[in-house]
Image (cartoon, rainbow, N blue to C red):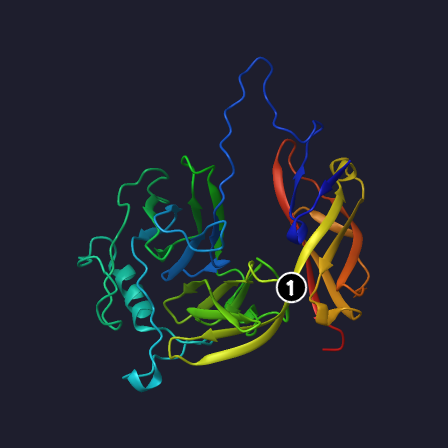
Amino acid sequence: MRMPVQALLSALVLAASLPASAQVLKGSKPAEEKPPNPNRLLLPSSAFAGGILTGYVMGPDNQPVANAPVAVNGGLLMGEVIGDPIKKKEEQRHEPPQSPSGGSFTDWQRTAIDFCKAGPGANPGPPDDNSGPPDKPSFQWSGRAATGGDAASPQWGGFTNAAGGFLICVPPGAKDLHVSTGGSEGGGAISVLIALDQPSVSQLPSDPPSFCSRGAHFDLKGAFPHATAEQEGKTSEVAVALALGPAGQALSTLECPPDLHPGPVKLTLTDGSSHTREYQAHLFQFVDGALDREHLLGGQPADFWYEVQMGPEEAGKSLCVNVSVAGPVVLTNPPAPQVTLNGDGRGRISGSIQATHVAPGSTVPFVIHAQFTECGK
């Protein structure tokens, strides 16, 4: 029995002797399942204690969703993300200080960190309508009632702002954050668990990947609140999630444009000082694949393969590929280190994995990740 594999070959390991279906007690009535949530969360992969975190709820049209519910365990949710206008250099009165990890903080980012330090007892002032000067932002707390969690990890609830974004204050003693959206009539809840200071900023790359899967997220060291993607003369905005620390730590998480087709794309990143960086990247897409689920569940080496679609300019080339896994699986037969693309720009990689021990009845996610590069570079 084979199972179709989506981009990045994410799947589930079910350590149970039963088929991979919902386990229902005999004679009990199955719980009514909610439809899948069409939205997704764009969040940094890590956060910094005593700092702030920004994110977006993205819709099926790849655009941010306004007024979407957001709940946070382990942090305090602020109701507004203040617009971060990019001022022309001649209009700037001063250059924001550089963060140790690259990029720079804007006025509202530094003010947000200070506001978080004051806590929800501070007077937030009137809600900001983005009409005031960008160097004098105001903030508004949201969801004061703890609707869940406990005293050590209260749950705060609120909604995204008109731009589809939200901002979270990370308490100094926080261990991790649990962020979710949905759970209403719009579909089941989707959740993201964010660890703190993992990995450290020093381990993050400074430049975007040269080959990027459509819709995949990648982290960069530094604060770059504004980004665009240009393909075939058309420019579109790229949503950026930020994690900023009180000591100047910063990382930016971007999503490879999911609505552009495979091929070259120019990414432009802008920091808080309006300094820009331009990169040439190549978008690709996973178009087909399979995993031997029966062998995987049986604890045996399970074959997998998946097919990648590059842009036409890569047709006929050989690319280097590094395949890694995360979660309770190991590579028993790694794919070949190079993949040759056919005349349509398609190539296939294949190998096998084997599940490691997980508790009986549990469901643990794993990921097979493929990183492509030009050989010799």
Tell me which residue sits at (41%, 35%) in the image: 185
- Mark 1 — residue? 262
Q: Residue at x 31, y 70 (%)?
A: 110
Which residue appears at 35% of the width and 84% of the height? Answer: 89
Q: Residue at x 72, y 28 (%)?
A: 17
Residue 334: percent from left, percent from top: 79, 56
State how many labels appear: 1
**Which is nearer the eye, 30 or 318?**
318
* Percent of width and height locating residue 253: 49, 63
Rendering coords of residue 250 (x, y %)? 44, 69
- 315 or 297, which lies in front? 315
Q: In which quadrant of the rendered view does residue 263 lie?
A: bottom right
Q: Secondary structure at mark 1?
A: loop
Describe residue 281's horizontal placement relative to residue 52 as left or right: right
Q: Quadrant of the N terminus?
A: top right
From the top left corner, tell me how far across and down residue 140 is, in percent: 24, 55
